[in-house]
Amino acid sequence: MNETITPRRFASKLSSDIPKHWLPGNEVVSSILNAYTILVPANEGFYVRTLKACMPRIANEQLHARCRNFIHQEAQHGVAHTRYWDNLDAQGYRFRTFEKNVDKLVFRVMEKFGPISLRVSLVSCVEHINSYIGHEFLSQGILAQADPEVKDLMEWHFAEEIEHRRVAFDLLQAVAPNYALRVLGFALTAGLFYSLMCAQAISLLAQDGILWRKETWRQVKSHMGSKHQMVRRTLKHLFDYLQPGFHPSQTGDDALAEEVLARLASTTPPAVAPTQPSQPRASEQVA
Ligand SMILES: [Fe+2]
Ligand SMILES: [Fe+2]
């Protein structure tokens, strides 16, 4: 089993002339992934702060190192997606108030009042969601016709979500190996994740004035049902997480992620570049 997590950064510059609907003929998938882009930085900031708070409790050195590289990857996802916000601003989308409110009312509140074990459980669940979203988009080639720069951004992120999919679950098993806590984390996370992403995607489609267009609903039907089967497949992946014997390594996507990351690193210039592994700070030393 490949446990290696490689620190990288997204090196592509992201041009200012990326089209508004960057997946030709599919404004719905473009808007869903634009919503994902808007929600990523606050979401991943929450993972980073949660894992940093856990670092002094992690006795296993290997897990400690994996968590450190996970933090590096998630921080870089936030940086790259935030850069893409400049394009969304230039295209006239209004999303920053929604994004700020989500951060303030969801993540900061949970951080203030939620015990660390519950916060790790939330991260573990959302990381399962991130990795199977990555699996579905990469294995079905959904972004094959997308604008090349946005395609690189999304595929890099999805591949790294697959690469580090085991870490948060292993951390949860290390700090709070409690099935009821895993289920509670699932109950809080799954509904919230999809509600926020759908609300933001609907807002973007409404701002484009195409929310009630017949073609939009044909695309929804195709993505959720007849073509990509996202509803059925999502329910199956969510159900898998609730199995008492579940472990993220049961989804064997490592070769898929490696292939995508190798391709992105070999373009000219490279879309993705390795960076130095981050060193532990004194406050993060293994207990
Ligand atoms: Fe991420
Ligand atoms: Fe992740």
Image: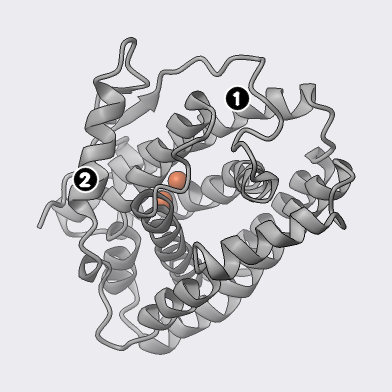
Residue 13 left/right relative to 66: right
Asked if 110 appears above or below 103 in the picture, the reply is below
- Numbered tag placed on residue 223 in the rendering: none
- Where residue 239 appears, x then y in whole percent? 42, 83
* Residue topped by disc 2: 65
* Residue topped by disc 1: 83
- For the point 31% across and 57% down, the residue is 165
The extreme top residue here reads 269
- Where residue 267 appears, x then y in whole percent? 30, 17
Residue nearer the viewer, 114 or 92: 92
Asked if 182 appears above or below 10 in the picture, the reply is below
Q: In the rendered view of the protein, which quadrant contains the C terminus?
A: bottom left
Q: Quadrant of residue 63?
A: bottom left
Residue nearer the viewer, 185 or 177: 185
| Pair 1/2: label in front | 1
Q: Amino acid at mark 2?
A: Ala
- Where residue 6 appears, x then y in whole percent? 23, 36
Residue nearer the viewer, 25 or 163: 25
Q: Residue 274: in sight, yes or no?
A: no
Say which label, 1 or 2, has the lower sequence index.
Answer: 2
Q: Determine the secondary structure under disc 1.
A: helix
10 Å crowding of disc 1: few (<14), some (14-19), many (20+): some
- For the point 87% across and 57% down, the residue is 212
Q: Quadrant of residue 133?
A: bottom left
